Image (spheres, rainbow, N blue to C red):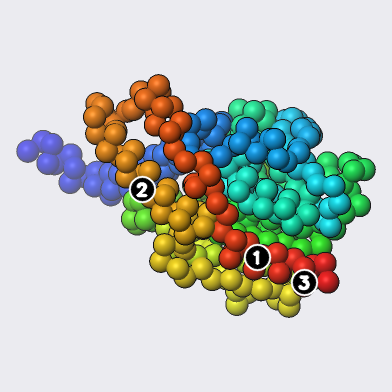
Amino acid sequence: MKLHSFFSRNKRRILPCAILFLILLYVIGGLGITALTFKNTYRAYNIPEDTAIAHWDYYENTYHRREVSFDSRGNLLKGHVYEVDAPKGLIVFSHGIWSGEEEYLTLITWLMDQNWDVFSYSYTAYNGSEGASAKGLPQSPIDLDSALTYVESDSQINHLTRVLMGHSWGAYASTAGLIYGHHVDGVVALSGFSDPIEISSDVADRMFGILGRSLNWAVDLLNKQRFGSESRQTAIAGINSISAPVLLVHGINDSFIGYNTSSIISHKDEITNPNVTYITLDDPLQSDHNNYFGNADATAYFKELDEQYKELSKQYKGGNVPDDVKKDFYAHTDKNRANQPNAALFEQIEAFLETEVLH
């Protein structure tokens, strides 16, 4: 009775305190969850050595590249200039998240075969570039800004027609990074997103439902704390800041950056640059986020390998395949078959470059 009497006398004070406590718990918990997600998502990363994707050792007897490095706000980033004898231009290529330039050599070497020099690099904390972590999505356009500053200082390539090209996080860099004002003659964005908050919200919603989407404020706050005024640059703002031609490529079955939700193409009604071309990938087998760089047979082969590897993993506790077994599995894959380029798509990209950029 005494306890009931206490609550009756103090309920006007207890209720506001309880509400305040719940709000405080939500704020602290939301920031904690978001900070842990950032730590895991933007951790330092190196591409796996054991894969069916051909790395440089597969190509080095046929093609030439030179290693370069440059500063990006206190971190030394690593990259390469892939050179041909008589280049008709330079493509500055930016890779996707949890990836690196060597995972795009099917495309890079195909471009070299068309007489393009290609400059590609690894972001902060990626593949040997310095940095404790990449910190967040706004890092990729920041690193591209530094990469273009390097290009402008390199007398072997700074005079060439310059095209920005990127995939996923790199497509965001190649469009949002246009606001830094470097000279650019054209842009090709493959499977890109426009807004770092929108894509974070979209992914969180698919993973955690309304709970994930309710933490947009925490994502925005952490981005602002880490990147200041550069925390929410958008691809649309970048595209609209130039008159140079832009090609946007996106698959309708993209399971990571939704075609109708967070892609750059989903914001096409906001684009005012009159020189934008669109390619929508609709082949059921080659219209996801990154399954269109190889030809149809290569894509089918990767699917076969994925299924075989899943079966292999069932033999081990927790699905953890020992390193030596994994190495042996991929050592016996057909690198030639796995790395045949998607010539049909690449030729469309080349046609855009020839007619809209070089013309």
Residue type indicated by callout 3: Glu
Kindly report the distance in space between the C-alpha atoms of the residues bearing marks 2 and 3: 38 Å
Q: Count neighbours of disc 2 (C-alpha within 10 A) and say few if under 14, some if 14 to 19, many if 20 or more.
A: few
Q: Are marks 2 and 3 in contact (CB under 8 Å)?
A: no
Residue 295 placement (x, y as % from top left): 51, 57
Residue 169 placement (x, y as % from top left): 59, 50
Is residue 51 visible in this depiction of the protein? yes
Closer to the eye: label 1 or 3: 1
* Quadrant holding the N terminus: top left
As drawn, the residue found furthest toward the left would be 1
Q: Quadrant of residue 306?
A: top left
User: Does 233 appear above or below 132?
Assistant: below
Q: Count neighbours of disc 3 (C-alpha within 10 A) and say few if under 14, some if 14 to 19, many if 20 or more.
A: some
Residue found at x 41% / y 27%? 328
Residue found at x 64% / y 41%? 101
Horizontal side of 69 relative to 59 (left or right) equals: right
Residue 155 placement (x, y as % from top left): 92, 43
Circle 2 residue = 304
Q: Which comes sooner in the sequence, label 1 or label 2?
A: 2
Residue type indicated by callout 2: Glu
Residue 75 placement (x, y as % from top left): 72, 30
Kindly report the distance in space between the C-alpha atoms of the residues bearing marks 1 and 3: 14 Å
Circle 1 residue = 347
Badge 1 marks a residue whose secondary structure is helix
Circle 3 residue = 356
Instruction: Choose between 292 and 129: the one closer to the eye.
Output: 292
User: Does 315 appear above or below 155?
Assistant: above
Residue type indicated by callout 1: Glu
Q: Which comes sooner in the sequence, label 2 or label 3?
A: 2
Q: Count neighbours of disc 1 (C-alpha within 10 A) and say few if under 14, some if 14 to 19, many if 20 or more.
A: some
